[in-house]
Image (tube, helix red, strand yellow):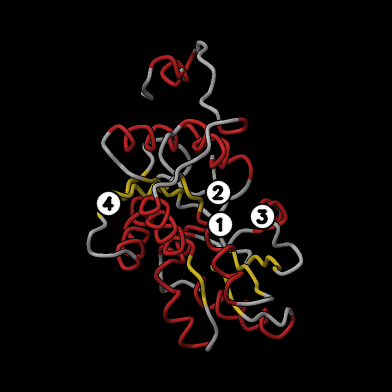
Amino acid sequence: MHILVVNPNTTASMTRTIAAAARAATGPSTVIEAVTSAMGPASIEGYYDEALAVPGLLAEIARGERAGAAAAVIACFDDTGLDAARAMAAIPVIGICEAALSLASFLARRFSVVTMSERSLVPITELVRRYGMEPRARVRALGVPVLDLEDRSSDAVAALRGEITRALKEDHAEAIVLGCAGMADLAAALQGEFGIPVVDGVGAAVKQAEALVTLGLSTGKRGAYARPAPKPYTGLLAGFGIEDKAVA
């Protein structure tokens, strides 16, 4: 089974962290292809970054599908471009936020999502509401830039531990969801340290992708996720027209 995992930002070191977490979660017959978007922001923190990351993300998913990927995972906790990708692709597409929240709901009645930037607080809170988890989940932000996670000697990991401690005390959290793909390699250590389930969205998403492929299920193509209507696209997006059957 070939699963494509797309980092929709352009930071290759983060992709390596994501790839390791994905491979650790999957079975021996699953091949993980982890790719970094070729265009867009270095990190995704808020609506502006998210919008400009979508074309590069869609390009990578289109390429991966043509290369034979059985499913795709979007490795950003904002579920960047998820609806557009599901409309474009015939294969299943999983967002790590939706995957992590659904998995956490199997494990705890109350849980906290801990993300990085304050700019991501409202977008992720809106996703929690969209996915029906608002009564059970609270979103917290460290107020630390995402790229600080790339330096494990920085204060970012200490800030994460502190925020988890506050979530346990103030939110009465029974589980923690790590709200950034760049945290993926920290889940096991934090679970051991705090003694509660700690859910990494990358691992959750690739396992759910494996399940969908095994069950022969893919995105419904009636209504919202129907294949986009053919029409011309111009300027920098000229190669994205569906009638071209390809994304540049």
Q: Position of residue 177 (x, y in %)?
A: 57, 69
Mark whose residue sits in front, 4 or 3: 4
Identify the residue shown where x is 44% and y is 34%: 89
Residue 158 sits above or below residue 239 on the image: below
Q: Which amino acid does label 1 sit on?
A: Cys
Is tag 1's residue or tag 2's residue first in the polypeptide sequence?
2
The residue depicted at 57 percent of the width and 70 percent of the height is: 104
Q: Of marks 4 and 3, which one's residue comes earlier in the chain?
A: 4
Residue where numbered disc 3 is placed: 131
User: Which of label 1 and label 4 is nearer to you?
Assistant: 4
Q: Is residue 196 left or right of 214 when viewed as pictured? A: right
**Rendered location of residue 96, percent (x, y):** 50, 56
* Residue picked out by circle 4: 1
The Cα atoms of the two marked residues, 3 and 2, are separated by 12 Å
Q: Position of residue 97 (x, y in %)?
A: 56, 57
Disc 3 is placed on an element classified as loop
Circles 3 and 1, Cβ within 8 Å, touching? The answer is yes
Nearest to N terminus: mark 4 or mark 2: 4
Real-space Cα distance between discs 4 and 2?
A: 23 Å
Q: Which of marks 1 and 4 is nearer the N terminus?
A: 4
Q: What residue type is labelled 4?
A: Met
Could you say which quadrant of the image residue 246 lies in? top left
Residue located beneath label 1 in the image? 97
- Mark number for residue 79? 2
Which is more foreground, mark 4 or mark 2? 4
For numbered disc 2, what is the local secondary structure?
Answer: loop
Q: Gap in Å between the C-alphas at discs 3 and 1?
A: 9 Å
Is 211 situated left or right of 139 in this image?
A: left
Name the residue: 76% across, 66% down: 135
As helix, strand or loop, the secondary structure at mark 4 comes to loop
